[in-house]
Image (cartoon, grey):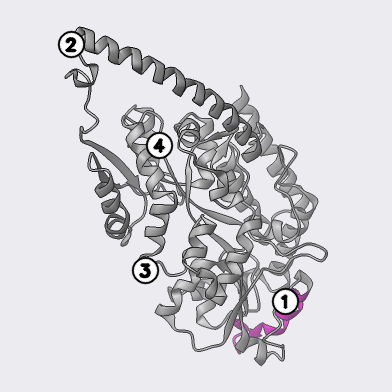
Amino acid sequence: MKRNTGPKAWRSRKGISIILGFTLVLTLVLAGCSSKNAVSESGTDDETDPAKPSSAEKVTIDFWFPWGGDYQKDFKKYVVDEFEKKHPNIKVKMTFVESSGQTQSSDKLLTAIAGGNPPDVALFDRFLIGSWASKGSLTDLTEFVERDGISPDDYYKSVWAESVYEDKVYALPWGTDNRAMYYNKTLMKKAGLDPNTPPKTMAELDKMAEATFVKGKNGKYDEIGFIPWMNQGFLYTQGWNWGGEWEKDGELTPNHPQIVKALDWMAGYAKKYNIENLTSFSTAIGQTGMNPFWTGKVAFVFDGNWVLNDLNKYKPEFEWGVAPMPAAEGYPNVTWAGGWSYVVPKGAKHSEEAWEFLKFVAHKEGTLLWNKRPTAGNDISVMPSVNEELKLSENPNLKIFLDMMPTAFTRPVTPVGSFLWNETMRVQDLAINGKGEAQQLLDEVKKNVDAELAKLKK
């Protein structure tokens, strides 16, 4: 696998580019002087040549996005309209293009790129940048970034790293999230636990969860202590919580010993508390249309900061809190971040104008405009300076998430990122349903991922 070498190597390239850029500017200045002399002698000025496009020529860029709801209306009002005021020669056409199936990507976008008729800009899942960049589907933005002084330090380290593949920048990060543990203080009290002391380790979580499982007369669960795969409890999540490494020394390591322990632990819950009974509970909760935690029937769950936005809708009548996710004994409490970005698809017809749009919406000015909107709720910006300016840490629940962002993990930047994700979900399902042992299943994932990478090298 070709390794993404990240910001350090990218910065060294930047230093070289600055030197070359200075030399180029000096050359152009001298050339400009000669050009002006030539114009005065010949009576012809290239800047007024009608064959050349005017700098004031209006250009419409096509911007594709996959979000429904109020996003289009709000983004136009708070961000796009402001961009167009500052760039009267650029008009932004917003086009909704839904994602394909259960993915965050669009087959329509990929088809448009392959057909040579892509949009100029797309709102894009950062997780997919490595796989799409490796296929040549995204425009390399490195020269734009270096030219206009966009610094990796403007963003959280992990989200910037997701935008870089093989030492080239393919996106500007925009919007992020991460994971923590929500806990029901009321259920903890009911079980005789201290509601102000949530679990910090997996062993503590197991013990407290066991105390909060409650069965009804029909033998089904009325209340659940914890289900490792509920909400954001993916194998990715639990792998990191157990101290696992999904990538090491440039190699994907889905069968890392601690990830094996994590999957074995997940399967242990399915066996101990009966997978059919747990599934029955989850299905019944799902029919309510509510996040399981806000039903008041789940003691502990791992979920994202966006769940805080449900408070205005559900107004829970029980006491609750937020804390970092527990970790395996001897390992630090961690989180992982996901989120979105803006990209210029390969073959875009107006790449310069598209970059101007990216630079506005995904750097401080546009990011601040978006995160200041009245409905921003508990959104986290990818820019620490914006989060500080908006004083987001004054919200004690959101502060739990913000404090973990500087050290948040992100999924490996790799051409087979989507494949690896799907493989982890496949074996997670097999393990909790008793259809394979953790070590054997994850060794199989490793074999499949390496085979997929080998195909790409041919």
Identify the residue shown where x is 63% and y is 84%. Answer: 219
Q: Would you call the spot at circle 2 few (<14 residues within 10 Å), some (14-19), or many (20 or more)? A: few
Give the label, 2 or 3, closer to the camera: 2
Question: Residue 251: where, in percent of width, then height?
Answer: 72, 38
Could you give the CA–CA distance between mark 3 and mark 4, rounded to whole angstroms?
A: 27 Å
| Residue 432 relative to residue 61: left or right | right
Give the label, 1 or 4, closer to the camera: 4
Where does the C terminus fall, quadrant-wise? Answer: top right
What SS does tag 4 mark?
loop
**Do tag 1 and tag 2 residues touch (Cβ < 8 Å)?**
no
The answer to whether residue 394 of the structure is visible from this angle is yes
Question: Residue 338: where, in percent of width, then height?
Answer: 54, 54
- What label does residue 344 carry, if any? 4
The answer to whether residue 108 of the structure is visible from this angle is no
What SS does tag 1 mark?
loop
Give the label, 2 or 4, closer to the camera: 2
Q: From what the image shows, is residue 398 above or below residue 106?
A: below
- What label does residue 375 carry, if any? 3
Please give the range of residues in magenta: 204-223
Give the label, 1 or 3, closer to the camera: 3
